[in-house]
């Protein structure tokens, strides 16, 4: 029963969550998507950060290279985990897997700190009424995101995969 956790990360959030999830498995390899050499695993979990409402380009390419696999996914995002945006991400990523006949057994996500350079850009480039501009609600969300993933997110990732029923 071999599990692969293949992740893509820009600033380390997704890697952290994937490493926490990995502790739930006995025989597991955790690799960046571009380090994956073969797909000879019983379960393949893909970790991705959210870029424009779906998996980032590297993770997306990797997901598209999978077919007829048992899979699951992990993502981190700047939006709140219980938002409609997070739900839309789940749907978009599930579709990516399912279009090549992969079976999605589960998924886990949590908020992840947004790259301060991106926040700076949004603060300087956009006015508060722009869809990505610095209005009070958005500034609060950026600040909330900056504290994640926290210890509870990592514990929850571990618990989620420990309890996931996988019929190998
Ligand atoms: C270029 C860029 C685009 C992003 N797009 C979204 C997005 O559409 N929705 C969202 O909720 N978060 C978005 N984020 C936030 C990241 O998904 C989030 O901070 C994530 O935790 C980063 O993970 P990483 O540290 O593994 O790279 C974006 C971040 C960047 C840098």
Image (tube, rainbow, N blue to C red):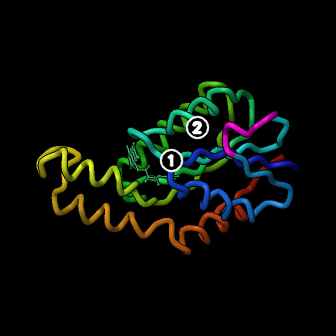
Query: Which quadrant of the structure image shows residue 98?
Result: top right
157 on left or right of 130 = right
Pointer 1: what residue? 49
Q: What residue did someone put label 2 on?
A: 59
| Residue 120 picture location, percent across and down | 27, 54
On screen, residue 24 above or below 50: below
Residue drawn at x 70%, y 58% is 164
On whether residue 151 falls in the magenta region, the answer is no
Is residue 155 shown above or below 40? Answer: below
- Between the C-alphas of marks 1 and 2, the distance is 8 Å
Task: Of the two numbered discs 1 and 2 on the same chain, state the one appearing first in sequence.
Answer: 1
The residue range painted magenta reads: 32-38
Residue 77 or residue 91, whichever sits in front: 77
Q: Residues within 10 Å of mark 1 (few under 14, many from 20)?
A: many
Residue at horizontal 61%, vertical 55%? 15
- State yes or no: Cβ of the residue under disc 1 lies below 8 Å from any atom of ligand 1: yes
Q: How many marks?
A: 2
Residue at image coords 65%, 25%: 100
Most foreground residue, 1 or 18: 18
Residue with the most extreme bottom position: 151
Q: Are marks 1 and 2 in contact (CB under 8 Å)?
A: yes
Name the residue at 63% across, 49% down. 106
Q: Is residue 132 left or right of residue 150?
A: left
The image shows residue 4, relative to residue 109, as above or below, that is: above
Asked whether residue 34 is drawn in magenta, I would say yes
């Amino acid at each position: 029963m071999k599990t692969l956790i293949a992740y893509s990360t820009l600033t380390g959030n997704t890697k952290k969550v994937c490493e926490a999830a990995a502790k739930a498995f006995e025989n597991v390899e955790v690799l960046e998507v571009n380090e994956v050499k073969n797909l000879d695993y019983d379960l393949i979990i893909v970790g991705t950060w959210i870029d424009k409402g779906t998996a980032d380009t590297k993770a997306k390419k990797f997901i598209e290279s999978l077919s007829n696999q048992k899979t699951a996914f992990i993502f981190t995002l700047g939006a709140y985990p219980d938002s409609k945006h997070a739900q839309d991400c789940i749907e978009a990523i599930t579709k990516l897997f399912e279009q090549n006949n992969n079976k999605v057994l589960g998924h886990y996500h949590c908020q992840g700190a947004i790259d301060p350079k991106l926040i700076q850009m949004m603060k300087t480039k956009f006015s508060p009424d722009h869809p990505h501009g610095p209005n009070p609600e958005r500034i609060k969300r950026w600040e909330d995101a900056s504290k994640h993933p926290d210890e509870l997110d990592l514990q929850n990732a571990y618990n989620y995969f420990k309890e996931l029923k996988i019929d190998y």
